Image (cartoon, rainbow, N blue to C red):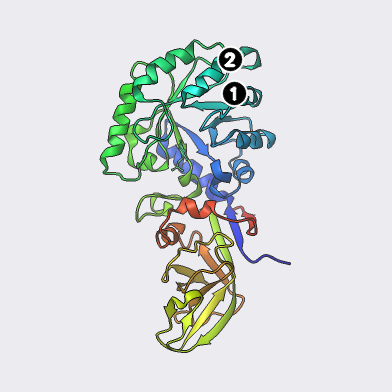
Amino acid sequence: MSRTTVATIHLGALRHNLERLRELAAPAKVMAVVKADAYGHGLERVARALNGSADAFAVASLGDGLRLRAAGHRQRIVVLSGPDQAGDIAEMQRLGLDAAIHHESQLQWLSEASPIRGRVRVWLKVDSGMHRLGFAPERAVAVHQQLATMPGIDPDIGLMTHFAESEVFDGERTREQIERFRDATRGLTGPRSLSNSAAVIGWPDARGDWVRTGGLLYGLSVVEGKSGADFGFRAAMTLSTRLIAINAIKRGERIGYNGLWECPEDMPVGVAAVGYGDGYPRSAVAGTPVLVGGQRVPLIGRVSMDLITLDLRDAPGAKVGDRVTLWGPELPVEIVAAQSGTISYDLTCGMTRRVLFVEDEE
Ligand SMILES: *Cc1c(COP(=O)(O)O)cnc(C)c1O
């Protein structure tokens, strides 16, 4: 049985995007963020495509660090939420993983780490205003001093913070966060890391010594109204399927579950073999663009588990078997995300197990 929904991962785009990030971020080093299975593109695949050219990888959990080491990658790997339990420290030492340290509970575990297994490299995470993970700014100096005295810790301690809305280029909050981080870490030695993808573009004075970029590596933007291509990045995923039916439907008839869309005239309605069971968003509204053989046509009716319906009035040449593209270089995923009330990251992360992944060198 062949699967019709295919996610094509463009390896050349990934390499281009990393180079572009390097240019924009220079002289800062680039941490390639590959959490959530590389934003749905495949952790091992993306790491292999970048083939040693990222200065470091960043992952959400120790398990992903293990996968990268098992695949033979020797770069620094930063576990963005650090150890979750005491036993993780020895594992991180064994695998040579950097740990982001954000909470008092982790200090106790680290203080018991034996230097014999190799010193743990740590990044002290400061909460400069996002209020998710991190030490309060007024604790930064004391925690830094405490870490510096621990025998199992590498004395070159990194300093890190994360922005809540760096994609708002004229917003106040990022400016405040930059200042709070600067004040909290003044006088402390060690490399600084503040910027995610949007900050690399919009907040050059937050560049620091390391940027931590995920989205743009995959050609994805979270800046409102902009796609990755608008900043010189290339989409690294194409999601495509086939047209499996074209039906002539009469004026006044209603299409799909709950009859959400009514035909304004007698018209051809296309059916494509993709749905929320593949990760195409069920929340996509009528009018969301879809490419049929290169022609943009609007989605109509409710997205089903396995199928979507399309208004083919503007695609008179469409025929059963035609390739249907849901997103990719010719149709930015950011547009589909905006029509679905979410962001591009959410869509690429949401590919399900029945989607067939293939690679393309372009
Ligand atoms: C996910 C994440 C990033 C990367 O964010 P992008 O917007 O994808 O570049 C950077 N830092 C931390 C702490 C993260 O969790």
Vertical arrangement, residue 284 with respect to residue 89, above or below: below
1 and 2 marks in contact (CB < 8 Å)? yes
Horizontal and vertical percent position of residue 325: 53, 66
Residue matched to label 1: 86
Residue appearing at x 42%, y 33% in the figure: 26
Type of amino acid at the residue the image marks with label 2: Glu
Mark closest to the chain's N terminus, 1 or 2 = 1
- Assign the C terminus to one quadrant of the image: bottom right
Left or right position of 145 against 70: left
The image quadrant of residue 2 is: bottom right
Vertical arrangement, residue 85 with respect to residue 229, above or below: above
84 or 33, nearer to the observer = 84
Horizontal and vertical percent position of residue 21: 45, 41
Residue appearing at x 54%, y 15% in the figure: 111
User: In terms of secondary structure, where does tag 2 sit?
Assistant: loop
- The numbered dot on residue 341 is none
Vertical arrangement, residue 172 with respect to residue 110, above or below: below
